[in-house]
Structures are given as structure tokens and as C-alpha cells.
């Protein structure tokens, strides 16, 4: 069991981030919820390293490498040096989460830490989605209570569906930061510029976004199909994530991917309704 002090630390970090994840994971039993908060705390810390303004890539690489070494120390020697690693060590021991998934997350953050990602090839985009989203899913399904191959398939597909939806939701914000996560093949075929400062006014941008939305839908469908072969109770948090994100695609489509209308989100009442429905099921 994670100590009360370490639980308090990771819980406070998750709560301070302002993410809906904090409330969403409350559907889990306390020990599993605390384990998920520990995983989120790890993700938050390494993501903050990648996103920190004013630091060069070499410095960020060094900090991310230090986290690789911390992960190795937990697995190889059972060593932990702070609240997050102590909490993660309990997660590793109790839920048998895999070292390679923590490393994949760090590798994904390193992709974001360097030169801005601009119009990656489809294969690079898929790798990025696997590292920053599906790897988190592979850790999560074990904490949820299912370590079967079907649960890994849920993580594989749902992570990609969630991340592609994030990419579509954040096109405008990413462009302002000099980033474009839409695939270069789709942009080239539609004649859309890969220049962040001009992409939002490209007439064919909605066509590109619609293709990415279809990729996301296909992954959500794969995840949903795989859930049928998993422990139903264990999949409730995954179902909640799907239910919270999939409707965003419908909103974006209705807007014809017009980012001048602002960032899309589900109203809080609808999220609560979805959560209640899953709990009742």
C-alpha cells in the first residue's frame, strides 16, 4: 500500500493540475485510485520537463534520462528516492506494470522536448501516439484490474483514439506554439500548408481533420470491441474516457473543424451523466 504521505503528495499534484482525471479516477477503489494518481504524477512531471519554456534540448534530455535511471532503479534494485518513485514502486509490486511502458512515455516526452513536431509522417505520428497515450493505457489497464492481451488491445486502440482526438481539439493551440501534429501525407494530398502560422486559414484543412477524425473513430471502435473480451468492471474507467472524448469528434465535425469557434469540450453536467451511467451499469 502507498504510504499516506506519498498518497497525499501525488493526489495534491493531480488535483493541482486541474485535470478531469482527478475526479474521473474516483470511481476506482481507493488503492487503485491512488495507484493511478501515482502514474499520473509521473506523467505530469516528465511532461513538464518536455514542455518547460526557456530550456535547451540537452538540459531536458538530461532530466528525462535521469527519470529513465529512476525507473531502472525501481525495477532492478527496488530503489525509490522521493514520493513519486516510492508510490510507483508500490504500483510496480502490486500491479506488475511493465518497465518498458514507463520508458515509452519518457521517449514520447523526449519527442516533444526537441524541435517542434511539424507534420509528422503517419508512422511517426502512430509511434508518438503509442508512447504518450497507449503506453499510459497499458499501465492503466493493469491497475484497473485486467492484464489480458485483450486489455492491452484496449490500451493500444483507445490510447490512439484519445490522442488523435486531443490533436484535433488542439490544432489552433498547437499552431500558436509552432506545432502541427496532423500527418504530412494527409496535408500534402489536400494541398494544405505545413506552416503553423498559415494552416488555420487553409481552405482544405477540414478535409485533413476529417480523415484524422476517421482514424480516431476506427481506434475507438477497435477499443470498444476489445472491451467485450475484458473484465467488465475493470474496463469502466476506460469506458468513461472513451465516453468523454468520442463526442468531441461529433462537435468538431458539426463545426466543420472551424477553430475560430474556440476549443471544444463537454459540459460538466454531461460528464457527470456519463459517469453515473457507467457506475449504474
Image: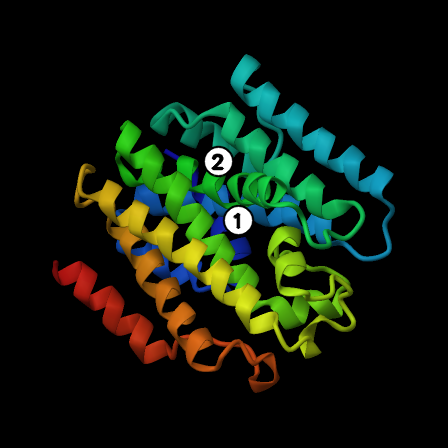
Q: How many marks?
A: 2
Label 2 close to label 1 by CB (< 8 Å) = yes
Q: Quadrant of residue 175?
A: bottom right
Quadrant for the C terminus, please: bottom left
Foreground residue among 249 and 52: 249
Image disc number at residue 87? 2
Residue 160's x, y, as percent? 46, 48
122 or 29, nearer to the observer: 122
Q: Which residue is mark 1?
A: 9
User: Could you tell me residue 238's position as x and y percent?
Assistant: 31, 50
Q: Nearer the viewer, residue 166 or 88?
A: 166
| Quarter of the image where one finds residue 70 | top right
Tag of residue 120: none
Q: Quadrant of residue 253?
A: bottom left
Q: Residue furthest left?
A: 281
- Residue reaching furthest bottom? 261
**Residue 229 pos. (x, y %):** 18, 37
Crowding near pointer 1: few (<14 within 10 Å), some, many (20+)? some
Label 2, secondary structure: give it. helix
Q: Residues within 10 Å of mark 2 (few under 14, many from 20)?
A: many
Q: Quadrant of the N terminus?
A: top left
**Residue 14 drawn at (x, y percent):** 51, 56
- Residue in view at x 35 percent, y 69 percent: 247
Does 243 appear above or below 231? below
Kindly identify the residue that appears in the image at 50 percent across and 47 percent down.
Answer: 40
Compute the Cα span from label 2 to label 1.
Answer: 10 Å
SS class of the residue under badge 1? helix
Amino acid at each position: 500500500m502507498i504510504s499516506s504521505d506519498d498518497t497525499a503528495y501525488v493526489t495534491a499534484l493531480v488535483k493541482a493540475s486541474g485535470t478531469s482525471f482527478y475526479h474521473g479516477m474516483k470511481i476506482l477503489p481507493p488503492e487503485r485510485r491512488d495507484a493511478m494518481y501515482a502514474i499520473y504524477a509521473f506523467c505530469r512531471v516528465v511532461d513538464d520537463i518536455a514542455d518547460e519554456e526557456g530550456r535547451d534540448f540537452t538540459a531536458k534530455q538530461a532530466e528525462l534520462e535521469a527519470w529513465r535511471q529512476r525507473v531502472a532503479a525501481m525495477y532492478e534494485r527496488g530503489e525509490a528516492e522521493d514520493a513519486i518513485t516510492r508510490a510507483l514502486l508500490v504500483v510496480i509490486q502490486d500491479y506488475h506494470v511493465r518497465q518498458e511502458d514507463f520508458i515509452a512515455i519518457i521517449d514520447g516526452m523526449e519527442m516533444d522536448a526537441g524541435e517542434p513536431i511539424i507534420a509528422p509522417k503517419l508512422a511517426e505520428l502512430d509511434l508518438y501516439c503509442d508512447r504518450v497515450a497507449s503506453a499510459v493505457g497499458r499501465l492503466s489497464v493493469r491497475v484497473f484490474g485486467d492484464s489480458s492481451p485483450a486489455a492491452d488491445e484496449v490500451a493500444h486502440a483507445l490510447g490512439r483514439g484519445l490522442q488523435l482526438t486531443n490533436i484535433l481539439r488542439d490544432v489552433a493551440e498547437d499552431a500558436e506554439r509552432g506545432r502541427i501534429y496532423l500527418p504530412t501525407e494527409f496535408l500534402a494530398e489536400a494541398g494544405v500548408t505545413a506552416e503553423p502560422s498559415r494552416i488555420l486559414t487553409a481552405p482544405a484543412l477540414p478535409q485533413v481533420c476529417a480523415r484524422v477524425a476517421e482514424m480516431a473513430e476506427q481506434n475507438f471502435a477497435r477499443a470498444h470491441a476489445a472491451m467485450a473480451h475484458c473484465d467488465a468492471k475493470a474496463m469502466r474507467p476506460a469506458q468513461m474516457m472513451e465516453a468523454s472524448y468520442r463526442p468531441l469528434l461529433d462537435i468538431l465535425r458539426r463545426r466543420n473543424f472551424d477553430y475560430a469557434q474556440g476549443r471544444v469540450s463537454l459540459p460538466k453536467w454531461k460528464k457527470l451523466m456519463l459517469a453515473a451511467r457507467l457506475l449504474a451499469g
